[in-house]
Amino acid sequence: MKASTHKTACILCSLNCGLEVETKDKAIVSVKGDKDHPVSKGYLCQKAARLDYYQNNPNRITKPLKRNVAGGFDEISWDQAISEVAQKLLSLKTSQGGHSLAYYGGGGQGNHMGGAHSGTLRGAMGTRYLYNSLAQEKTGGFWVNGKLFGRQTCHPSEDIEHSDYLLIIGTNPWQSHGFPRARKELTAISKDPARTMVVVDPRRTGTAKRGDIYWSIKPGTDAQLMIAMIAIMIQEELFNKEFLAEHCVGFDQVQLHFGKINIDEMIDITGLDKDSVRKVTRDFCKAKAGCVRTDLGLEHSINSTLNTYLSKLLFLLPGHFGKKGTTNLHTSLVPLIGHSREPDSGAYKTKVTGMHEISKFFPPNILPLEIDTDHPERVRGVVVDSGNPLVTAADTQAYEAAFKKLELLVVIDVALTETAKLAHYVLPVATQFEKWEATFFNLEFPENFFHLRRPLFDAPDTVLTEPEIYRRIAVAMGALPERFPILEQVAKLDRRFPKLKLFPIALAATLKRKPHWKQMLPIILHQTMGKLLPDGANVGAVLWGSSHMYVNEYGNEAVEAAGVENKGQGIGEALFEKIMGSPSGTFISKHQYEDSFQFIKHKDSKIHLAIDELFTEIQNLKPYQSSTEFPYLLMAGERRSYNANTIIRNEAWRKLDPDGCLKIHPSDAAREGVKTGDEAWLETARGHLKITLSVTDEINAGVLSLPHGYGLSHPGKADEKDGAAVKMGPLINSLTDSLHCDPIAKTPFHKHIPARLRAS
Ligand SMILES: Nc1nc2c(c(=O)[nH]1)N[C@H]1C(S)=C(S)[C@@H](COP(=O)(O)OP(=O)(O)OC[C@H]3O[C@@H](n4cnc5c(=O)[nH]c(N)nc54)[C@H](O)[C@@H]3O)O[C@H]1N2
Ligand SMILES: Nc1nc2c(c(=O)[nH]1)N[C@H]1C(S)=C(S)[C@@H](COP(=O)(O)OP(=O)(O)OC[C@H]3O[C@@H](n4cnc5c(=O)[nH]c(N)nc54)[C@H](O)[C@@H]3O)O[C@H]1N2
Ligand code: SF4
Ligand SMILES: [Mo]
């Protein structure tokens, strides 16, 4: 077959850069940046070049599998798979209650359509247990956002492109991105003498090398650094009085807590230069457009939730908010997260550990504890979609033990993953290039965008999409009818006469009669309006509902300003049509910077600066004392040029670093008597791994770093156990412990793991 060119997006990180790919037969043969993508504008990083290693993957599964008594898998029909899974879910729900069932995942870096339709499955299961990777990194920050801005759904977006003073703390966008066109933006800032970039990291990263100022901080002391900076702002009165008076409450309490901090003592803990910290703080406050960008270096370190709070006070006190080049709140077409109540005011809590829900999620760190117990209300059945917790959640051993005790484990994936290997049923899905897909990582402001991607290939006949799997299970459980004949008829009329709003009226009447279907609305849309969308784009129907809601929430003006033309069909309808008709993605709204203040959800429309729980943490803060037993601090999960979570399972994809080396400082290597290429044992209180060393002065003495996303098994390779794992790189979560996590959000302290080396 001749090669043909198509628009799609990269699925390897949350930026989802627009791509123009050439396909031939069943393969992606070339990859270029799509200049028409509204945000990435043709930008790409090196990881996208060989995406075919995802599409054509030797671990691919295309038939439903059922575990047999010998521990292997038998291929079964979809009818058998759906009816047995439905019957087992129903039986656990009836005998033990819906809370004996949990759902894990719902989407990765490139696919959120499954998650958007998964409420139907959870509704049928009767559970609120939604475990998700976001709750092993971002939920502490979401909880803080809820306190500051009124709802956990209020999400800040950094306008790095226009900032003139950028603090980068605990992230390496040169490798991990995290904001659009990261390398281009970092290069632009580093070349512009009028703009300043300060990078705070215990490793001299690609980002640090481009910084005007690099602070080589002692790991896990960022809280002390930020407390010192906030105290400098308070004690030297560098804060923005007008901004605080107009837009914030609770500043007096912040003043009280930080006014008495001993700044020099705090800076001493971080190992940084006092004059430099003072000067940067002053310059940052004076800057026209100051911005703070953080990520896992703060969230996966000790004081995780506190760190996210402090990093927000850093930009709020000088008033670097609601303006060009600062931080703003952004809109969401389909919100990625929800809002949950506070622990002390009716939050939903898990039955075994009593963990409270945050932004509708539960943290992967507690799931093994909720399963592996005699507690009568333990979790007994789990459905995993688009996640590989055996490898990516903390504490592989705890997960393995817990998952082996489950009465039902169902894994929905494109590949036979480590988690799938433990499942009772494995349900194969179309890859992200074989179905209509999108993510809800649309975090831009003032102009936000959306990209609905078309399939590049036909899916094999024997796989389904996630929404279709959820629908079939829910129907088999008796939670939803097979068809909605009246709504289907009305949808047909509505497509011809959208102005009459016949379908919204019929839908509202249906939901009034059956309010429990609200959670299943995306599947109802998928089965009615969705059937009328061209080229099998059923999942697009959820965007029809979202487009109307988006206009209701954010107003016509901002949507029209983004170039969405109302040609008489109504602006919500016009937005939907624009999304459906834009293969490169499209802008969906354009706001004014001041609109950011309107997105604050507190009744008084102000930012509430004081968080009592975290003031208490500050008072009790103690610096980490290293132990003689485990003298190093391991940062378990570095982003490198060839890792991308566990999305690509073929090591041939990696042009560099096939072993996923452990980085170590030359002085430590000399003391240990090791050199680059040597193997050694790395030991933590939880486990040990054989690793290959890479000696580099990029990293601080006393600190070690291993990459994320390695440790996968591969056909033809021995299943990893200890030394054999080296072949596929280190399975880092065999070194981490479920209990080593944040007290509020239970996010893991992966960047702060006491460790030691032993000669191999
Ligand atoms: N190449 C690549 N890119 C990715 C991914 C990938 O797998 N590969 N994954 C994506 C995902 S899911 C995420 S969440 C993001 C994460 O993106 P990042 O958070 O940027 O990634 P990391 O490399 O894990 O950690 C960032 C930095 O934190 C530093 N750090 C460690 N401990 C400390 C500390 O105590 N203080 C400070 N200040 N810094 C510290 C590390 O040295 C590291 O440079 O990346 C995304 N992008
Ligand atoms: N120690 C340590 N652990 C970490 C981290 C760390 O830094 N250190 N980082 C953490 C972070 S930030 C994250 S985000 C997580 C990521 O970890 P996970 O949430 O587990 O996500 P992925 O590795 O992206 O795995 C996605 C799964 O989706 C499957 N998949 C791909 N396409 C599709 C599809 O279309 N449909 C379905 N159903 N499945 C599909 C893939 O085969 C893979 O099994 O890892 C976390 N784990
Ligand atoms: S991995 Fe690179 S190309 Fe792919 S979305 Fe992220 S930044 Fe873009
Ligand atoms: Mo992540």
Image (cartoon, rainbow, N blue to C red):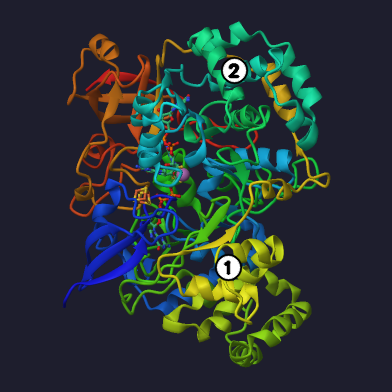
Vertical order, 467 against 175 (above or below): below
Residue 655 lies, in percent from the top left, at 19, 43
Q: Nearer the viewer, residue 141 or 294?
A: 294
281 relative to 154 in the view: left or right: left
Q: Does mark 1's beta carbon lie closer than 8 Å to ligand 2? A: no
Give the number of the disc on residue 438.
none
Amino acid type of the residue tagged 1 in the rendering: Leu
Residue 402 lies, in percent from the top left, at 49, 47
715 relative to 425 in the view: left or right: left
Q: Quadrant of residue 505?
A: bottom right
Residue at the image position 73 percent from the left and 50 percent from the top: 598
Q: Which residue is mark 2?
A: 282
Give the number of the disc on residue 121.
1
Task: Estimate the spatial distance between the alpha carbons at disc 1 and disc 2, rounded to whole Å.
Answer: 52 Å
Quadrant (top left, top right, bottom left, bottom right) of the C terminus = top left
Q: Nearer the viewer, residue 126 or 572?
A: 572
Q: Secondary structure at mark 2?
A: helix
For marks 1 and 2, the one nearer the N-term is: 1
Between label 1 and label 2, give the one nearer the viewer: 2
Q: Quadrant of residue 157?
A: top right
Residue 479 lies, in percent from the top left, at 64, 76
Q: Quadrant of ligand 1?
A: top left
The residue lying furthest to the front in this view is 194
250 relative to 757 in the view: left or right: right
Q: Is residue 58 visible?
A: no
